[in-house]
Image (cartoon, rainbow, N blue to C red):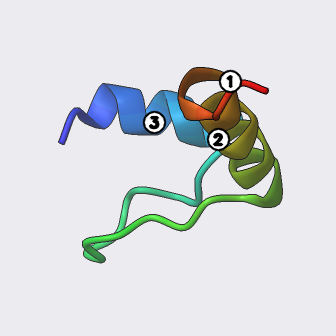
Amino acid sequence: MDWDVMNRLHEKGYIGNPKSKAKSVPLTEEGARISEALFKKHFGLSS
């Protein structure tokens, strides 16, 4: 993992604190909302 990227995502409030022994990081509500919007923008079906 690129810890600098993880720290920047945490500082922006998109993910929970990555400084733990857990192998996963929870998304914040804002992070989930933004990731869903980006997924739809880049991978969504066009009408």
Identify the disc placed on residue 7: 3
- For the N terminus, which image quadrant? top left
Q: How far is the residue under mark 1 from the one under mark 3? A: 25 Å
Residue drawn where x is 25% and y is 72% of the image: 23
Q: Where is residue 2 in the image (x, y as percent from the top left)?
A: 22, 33
Identify the disc placed on residue 19: none
Q: Where is residue 17 in the image (x, y as percent from the top left)?
A: 52, 58
Q: Tag 3's secondary structure?
A: helix
> Please, which residue is most extreme toward the left here?
1
6 displayed left or right of 22: right
Quadrant of the image occupied by residue 36: top right
Q: Mark 2 points at which residue?
A: 35
What kind of residue is marked 2? Ser
Quadrant of the image occupied by residue 6: top left
What kind of residue is marked 1? Lys
Q: Name the residue under label 1.
A: 41
Q: How far is the residue under mark 1 from the one under mark 2? A: 10 Å
Q: Which of marks 1 and 3 is nearer the N terminus?
A: 3
